Image: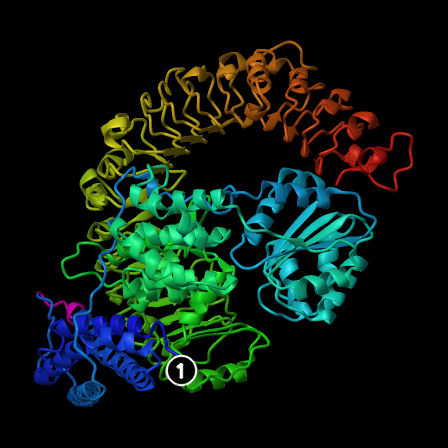
């Protein structure tokens, strides 16, 4: 069978080799003629690729064998040339370390090991001989030399172009499945006498089963009905113990460390006991009767509560029947139908033109292209993505020559996906797509991690004339794969992740003959006909089997993801690795032999137990990415500055005493550096940051008290770092006497592109001028934070900061007044927090000027009076979360809630009652120890879903108006020292949505809220219904 990816693999590998060969590394080693000859051969052979690819698809065996031979030699050439490149980098590092005035970037007979020269010359000649043979074979096969044509990549989107915006797949609305969702939700909510019931959703791939299941899973009615929800991707056949493990992981959100079934099941019972739950098993293929009988028998024994459901999505009618039979369900599986033509058209049209006008060329093929979709939303989306990447003039040809020839239901979907793959505009993008097969189905991979892996593999080579960095090329490739509907985008908070539809993953797997993923239960043998270059092994493969397998693949292996540990001897044998992922490993010390792997571009030790990194790691002169996130690593190697190619260091340590490695400024390629602790000695001073011109993302600079003046601070060159988006500036706290903080901060002025700024422990009483004019100096600033700036008597003016979305003022004890107009025209402000400002007396903010506010927190400002607090809550129609108190008690009524009398309750109540969609959802209210009543006004905030009340120490009973909170899901009570009575039983029973009642520091109530309490004052009967 033809290898659909081999031509792209060879082209990418040859380009890498030619790029290395064109560098001056070879010209001065003493065998430049051989190297030049090898380069000519590579270029000549590359010209045969187009013809060879066409002929291998016609099942010409001889051509397929020729391509395999060429692939192997191309990889060998790449490794040899990369070894020369490594030697060049080593020489640069050693020359620099000898403190030479001029960096030596070439080899000479006197400064290079003679044995190395001889060995490399021999390798180059061997490859040249092989290439000559392959060139002769090409003529013998009659291959025709043609230029390799690569389609022009679509231009990157202009700023503000919304056509390329990708919606979050988690919350994206479904098209045409509202009736299906309504019917299934009705079934799941209907009364059931069974402990567990099951409903399979069955249908061919591409119909949208998973999308429908996700929408059901996130349905509000489902949230209100079930106490627990669990989502498990079950696309792999696994033993029952592993299925239980997956369920437990999703319940606890923690790694399961045990393998004993009894322990795992007991932990699941602790989570589900007495609760009604929804379990979704997505993309099920396992037709093992015994497994499903075992699973459901166990689940029924865990929980006597009736009404739990298991929702199963599957393409297999046999699986649906077996799953239903295991619980003797009367109802048949829910068969998902095809979408009508008009809905397929809406999906396709949105993909091609977004909200724009439909061009004539698309209208002309509308009926025929809809017919090709055949009611499958995935097909509509992929065809739309394909057309979008092509010129309008090509649409008719694509339809007639390719799409109209497709047939056969699920095969048709795969044919459409394959067509989309074939039309990706670059062999590099095809390699990026196929690379996904190294990840398990349903994986969500963070954007930067994915791009850094592609970069390490050599898939992001820039054009000679391109000014784009490799990371920017990766972003462009991601955009193209998203437009093609081959990738899906998901956003969580501040990070972006990507995933694949399971059918698209099937396509990636079918393209990747050089990739092997070994899971528990898989055999460990590998077909020697296919050179395995990318390997993933999970933790269930025994150490002996793992090492035996790795030894057999050591020569060809390019990438290794292993959930387990590697011995020093084994690691040394993997000499051609470019990517090594040992994340979540349990060894505490990285083997010294890591320094022998000269090709390594990416090392991932995240979440591992590794504490010690050997200094040999710093011999990896090709290393681009080192990931230590959430690992146990205590310190960085002393020679980190030797990692001359390092671009991304993913490592964060909060310890201010942590010493940075010396001379970090030598890492001039560095883009990702999470923090920098300023030191006293040369090589650790703040000037090291000045050389790091390409820093991007977030940066935290600590110990700024060691910088003595503006000139010293300016050596950071922060004003030139246009790719920094988040900056945290931190001095040491509890300093006495005079300081230079204002001058230093003046010299730390960032680039105007900055979006987030945090300043901590700043001890001057005035801010520098650039901070006093933020709308001009930082026009894109969205978040501003001041922490423990204790000598500041007043805050800088923020009027007209129209981009500002978040303002936090924490522990600024010198502040006494915040002017009412300080946020005038801050129309984008969504979050405002003022906390632990001990001397703040007045903050009469006019909330009419901040209409977009979603969260407001005024907490632990003990001298603030409610009469001098923000007013105008009636204008905050978007406010969702409010935290207030405790405030100054300056009244005579020490028994009641007088401190809140002048709070703007009327405005808050009016904004919350104007419509249910604009109502306040979360209220956190704090009082004083002597207060004997709650502010009665809160009873009118009936849309609250979360209510926290604290430090009302004199209250003995909660009022019955708590029954008004019909939407309340969570109730927190802190330090009600005298509280002994909850509201009446009728009031408590009115809280039908209440899932959690948390009581802290209330000893009387705690004693009465137990099943054992039998006194007349027992409160147990009032809480038994709470989920």
Which image quadrant for residue 733?
Answer: top left
Which of 56 and 623 lies nearest the eye of the viewer? 56
Q: Is residue 997 left or right of residue 506?
A: right
* Residue 828 within the magenta-colored segment of the rendering: no
Query: In this rendering, does residue 476 appear at all?
Result: no
- Residue plotted at (32% across, 78% down): 56
Which of 339 and 275 lies nearest the eye of the viewer? 339
Which image quadrant for residue 636?
Answer: bottom left
In the displayed structure, would residue 304 be above or below residue 789?
A: below
Q: Which residues are magenta?
A: 95-101
Q: The C terminus lies in which quarter of the figure?
A: top right
In the displayed structure, would residue 766 be above or below residue 213?
A: above
Which image quadrant for residue 451?
Answer: bottom left
* Residue 97 within the magenta-colored segment of the rendering: yes
Q: What coloring was used for the rendering?
A: rainbow
Residue 455 appears at what percent x and percent y?
Answer: 30, 63
- Residue plotted at (10% across, 70% down): 104
**Residue under circle 1?**
530
In the displayed structure, would residue 745 be above or below residue 663?
A: above
Which of 750 and 95 lies nearest the eye of the viewer? 750
Which of 952 and 357 lies nearest the eye of the viewer? 357
Residue 33 appears at what percent x and percent y?
Answer: 8, 84
């Amino acid at each position: 069978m033809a290898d659909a990816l081999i031509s792209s693999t060879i082209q990418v590998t040859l380009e890498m080799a030619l790029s290395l060969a064109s560098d001056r590394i070879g010209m001065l080693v003493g065998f430049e003629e051989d190297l030049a000859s090898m380069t000519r051969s590579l270029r000549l052979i590359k010209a045969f690729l187009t013809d060879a690819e066409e002929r291998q698809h016609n099942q010409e065996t001889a051509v397929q064998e020729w391509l395999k031979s060429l692939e192997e030699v191309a990889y060998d050439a790449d490794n040899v040339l990369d070894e020369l490149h490594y030697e060049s980098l080593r020489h640069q590092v050693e020359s620099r370390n000898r403190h030479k005035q001029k960096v030596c970037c070439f080899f000479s007979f006197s400064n290079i090991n003679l044995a190395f020269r001889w060995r490399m010359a021999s390798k180059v000649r061997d490859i040249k001989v092989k290439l000559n043979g392959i060139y002769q074979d090409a003529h013998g096969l009659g291959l025709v030399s043609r230029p390799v044509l690569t389609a022009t990549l679509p231009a990157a989107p202009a700023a503000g172009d919304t056509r390329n915006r990708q919606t979050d797949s988690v919350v994206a609305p479904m098209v045409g499945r509202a009736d299906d969702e309504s019917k299934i939700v009705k079934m799941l909510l209907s009364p059931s006498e069974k402990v567990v019931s099951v409903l399979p959703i069955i249908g061919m791939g591409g119909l949208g089963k998973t999308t429908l299941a996700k929408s059901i899973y996130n349905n509000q009615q489902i949230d209100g009905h079930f106490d627990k929800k669990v989502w498990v991707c079950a696309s792999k056949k696994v033993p029952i113990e592993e299925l239980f493990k997956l369920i437990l992981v999703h319940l606890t959100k923690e790694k399961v460390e045990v393998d004993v079934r009894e322990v795992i099941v007991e932990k699941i019972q602790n989570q589900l006991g007495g609760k009604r739950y929804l379990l979704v098993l997505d993309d099920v293929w396992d037709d093992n009767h015994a497994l499903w009988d075992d699973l459901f028998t166990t689940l029924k024994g865990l929980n006597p509560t009736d009404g739990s459901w298991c929702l199963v999505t599957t393409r297999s009618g046999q699986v649906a029947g077996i799953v239903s039979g295991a619980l003797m369900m009367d109802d048949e599986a829910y068969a998902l139908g095809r979408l009508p033509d008009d809905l397929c058209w809406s999906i396709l049209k949105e993909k091609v033109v977004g909200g724009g006008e439909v061009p004539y060329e698309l209208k002309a093929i509308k009926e025929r292209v809809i017919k090709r979709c055949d009611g499958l939303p995935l097909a509509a989306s992929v065809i739309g993505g394909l057309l979008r990447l092509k010129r309008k003039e090509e649409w008719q040809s694509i339809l007639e020559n390719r799409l109209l020839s497709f047939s056969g239901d699920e095969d048709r979907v795969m044919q459409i996906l394959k067509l989309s793959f074939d039309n990706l505009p670059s062999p590099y993008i095809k390699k990026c797509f196929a690379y996904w097969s190294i990840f398990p189905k349903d994986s969500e991979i963070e954007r930067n991690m994915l791009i850094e892996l592609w970069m390490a593999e050599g898939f992001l080579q820039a054009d000679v004339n391109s000014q784009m960095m490799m990371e920017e090329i990766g972003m462009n490739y991601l955009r193209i794969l998203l437009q093609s509907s081959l990738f899906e985008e998901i956003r969580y908070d501040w990070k972006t992740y990507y995933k694949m539809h399971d059918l698209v993953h099937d396509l990636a797997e079918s393209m990747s003959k050089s990739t092997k993923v070994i899971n528990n239960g898989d055999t460990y043998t590998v077909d020697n006909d296919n050179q395995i270059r990318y390997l993933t092994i999970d933790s269930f493969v025994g150490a002996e089997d793992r090492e035996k397998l790795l030894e057999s693949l050591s020569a060809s292996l390019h990438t290794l993801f292993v959930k387990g540990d590697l011995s020093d001897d084994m690691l040394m044998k993997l000499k051609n690795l470019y990517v090594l992922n040992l994340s979540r490993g349990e060894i505490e010390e990285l083997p010294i032999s890591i320094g022998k792997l000269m090709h390594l571009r990416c090392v991932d030790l995240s979440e591992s137990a590794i504490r010690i990194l050997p200094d040999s790691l710093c011999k990896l002169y090709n290393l681009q990415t080192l990931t230590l996130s959430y690992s146990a690593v205590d310190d960085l190697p002393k020679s980190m500055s030797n990692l001359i190619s390092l671009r991304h260091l993913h490592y964060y340590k909060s310890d201010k005493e942590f010493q940075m490695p010396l001379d970090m400024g030598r890492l001039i390629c560095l883009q990702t550096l999470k923090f920098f602790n300023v030191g006293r000695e040369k090589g650790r001073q703040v000037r090291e940051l000045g050389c790091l011109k390409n820093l991007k993302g977030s940066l935290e600079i600590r110990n700024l008290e060691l910088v003595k003046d503006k000139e010293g601070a300016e050596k950071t060159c922060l004003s030139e770092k246009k790719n920094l988006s988040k900056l945290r500036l931190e001095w040491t706290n509890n300093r006495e006497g005079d300081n230079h903080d204002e001058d230093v901060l003046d010299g730390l002025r960032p680039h105007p592109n900055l979006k987030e700024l945090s300043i901590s422990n700043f001890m001057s009483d005035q801010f520098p001028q650039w901070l006093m004019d933020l709308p001009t100096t930082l026009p894109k600033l969205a978040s501003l934070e001041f922490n423990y700036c204790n000598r500041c008597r007043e805050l800088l003016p923020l009027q007209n900061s129209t981009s500002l979305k978040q303002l936090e003022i924490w522990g600024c004890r010198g502040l006494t007044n915040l002017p009412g107009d300080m946020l005038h025209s801050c129309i984008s402000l969504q979050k405002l927090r003022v906390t632990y400002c001990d001397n703040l007396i007045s903050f009469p903010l006019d909330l009419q000027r901040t209409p977009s506010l979603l969260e407001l927190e005024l907490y632990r400002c003990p001298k603030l009076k409610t009469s001098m607090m923000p007013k105008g809550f009636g204008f905050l129609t978007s406010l969702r979360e409010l935290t207030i108190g405790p405030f100054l008690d300056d009244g005579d009524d020490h028994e009641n809630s007088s401190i809140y009398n002048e709070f703007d309750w009327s405005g808050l109540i009016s904004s919350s009652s104007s419509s249910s969609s604009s109502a306040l959802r979360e209220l956190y209210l704090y009082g004083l120890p002597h207060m004997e009543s709650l502010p009665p006004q809160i009873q009118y905030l009936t849309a609250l879903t979360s209510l926290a009340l604290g430090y009302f120490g004199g209250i003995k009973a909660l009022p019955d108006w708590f029954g008004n909170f019909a939407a309340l899901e969570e109730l927190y009570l802190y330090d009600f020292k005298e509280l002994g009575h909850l509201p009446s039983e009728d009031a408590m029973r009115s809280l039908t949505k209440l899932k959690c009642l948390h009581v802290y520091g209330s000893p009387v109530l705690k004693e009465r809220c137990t099943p054992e309490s039998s006194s007349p004052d027992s409160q147990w009967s009032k809480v038994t219904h709470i989920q």
